[in-house]
Image (cartoon, grey):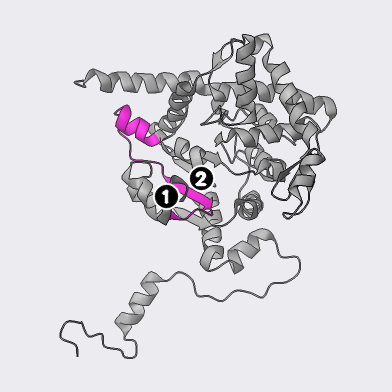
Amino acid sequence: MHPHKPHYDRHGGTDANKDFLHKISRERIDPPAITSGISTADLLDGVFLSYNAGRLREGCQLFVRKMLANNGTIGLALSGALTPAGLGMSCLVPLVEAGFVDWIVSTGANLYHDTHYALGMDLYQAGPNLPDLELRENQVIRIYDIVFDYENLLGTDKFFRTLCRGAAFQQTMGTAEFHFLVGKYLAEREQQTGVVGKSLLAAAYRCGVPIFTSSPGDSSIGMNLAALMLEGSLLRIDPLRDVNQSAAVVWDAKASGGTSSVFILGGGSPKNFMLQTEPQIQEVLGLAEAGHDYFLQFTDARPDTGGLSGATPSEAMTWGKVDPEKLPDSVTCYIDSTAALPLLTAYSLTRHEKRPLKRLFDKFPELTLRLETGYAQTRAGRIE
């Protein structure tokens, strides 16, 4: 035996060895044969056993069994071009209406493209290998394998400029307040056309679900608001109000004895904005808290590049973003959100009954007051 290497005795398993195997194991791999007509939920529970399929099953079960349990508060972070692909109307609207999503942080782009559908504009399936120069010459816009008429952009731009010139918008507001007001008009448009359920913004308005945008200038919505500023518009977006309102949502969920969960599609700025609520509460405001209780992410970003999009829940835990005691309940599934989200939506709607709507937007005054009161108490004891 090499003097500097330990010797591992290889032999038939003892009872102690078998006990160890059972300790680290879950269920035996013995899936049923797939038959015609099997439900999505049964397929996930019975056949998605290992590798990223296993993580997807664990994520769906975490969402239903723990994140939705006991009326916990669930935040959804939304990045990537999901609404252009129809995932707003097929997945996000049903989740919001079922009470499975209580607050949202989204890229502005997802909300801008969501508006196309509320306005009755069409987007089309195509292919990823199209002649882009010909598309440009024919006034066609491409998002990978989605195509639509350039007029969609011009019409949506005109809608936002016309709407936001109105008296109701001539004030300073946070992005949640802005999106709620936009959602009100889109919901009215859906009612007028008789096509309800196409717009996430409209559904969020009807259900009282606040939608924040962490980078309000980084989308066509922000570009049009900037143009209105050149006209003399009094509309101003206050991102610091967003920081306090989002932290107030999480603080209330935890201080009330409930749970706070994050469901992250993709990564980027929405992921960070949602997770930073806990460092805001603990580090900046000095309130006693431990972190979000449950963490579920669908992403294609790797952790080894050091970027936030691929940062693991364990790394987030070191910042106070995730409760260390709940870390074993965190699930990261390396999969395209466009494949995973429809499966999770079908699974959760099958395995869990609808929940009462929290209507957190309506509660912002009391939630922020509670946060202000807590901060005033800790600040009084600080030496700065």
* Residue at image mark 2: 267
* Residue at image mark 1: 311
Nearer-N-terminus badge (2/1): 2
Q: Is residue 199 left or right of residue 303?
A: right
Residue at the (76%, 28%) spot, across then down: 154
Camera sees residue 68: no
Q: Quadrant of the N terminus?
A: bottom left
Helix, strand or loop at mark 2: loop
Seen from the viewer's position, the closer of residues 290 and 310 is: 310
Residue 78 in the image: state x and y as whole percent. Answer: 57, 41
Residue 292 counted in the magenta span: yes
Residue flagged by tag 1: what amino acid is it? Ala
Seen from the viewer's position, the closer of residues 239 and 366 is: 239
Camera sees residue 363: yes
Helix, strand or loop at mark 1: loop
**In this picture, which residue range is highlighted in magenta?**
278-303
Residue 58 in the image: state x and y as whole percent. Answer: 51, 59
Among all residues in the image, which is located at the extreme left? Answer: 3
Residue flagged by tag 2: what amino acid is it? Gly
Does the CB distance between marks 2 and 1 fall below 8 Å?
Answer: yes
Q: Quadrant of residue 359?
A: top right
Residue 301 counted in the magenta span: yes
Residue at the (38%, 70%) spot, across then down: 24
Seen from the viewer's position, the closer of residues 313 and 204 is: 313
Mark 2 neighbour density, 10 Å: few (under 14) some (14–19) many (20 or more):
many
Residue 192 in the image: state x and y as whole percent. Answer: 83, 24
Q: Quadrant of the C terminus?
A: top left
Residue 174 in the image: state x and y as whole percent. Answer: 53, 21
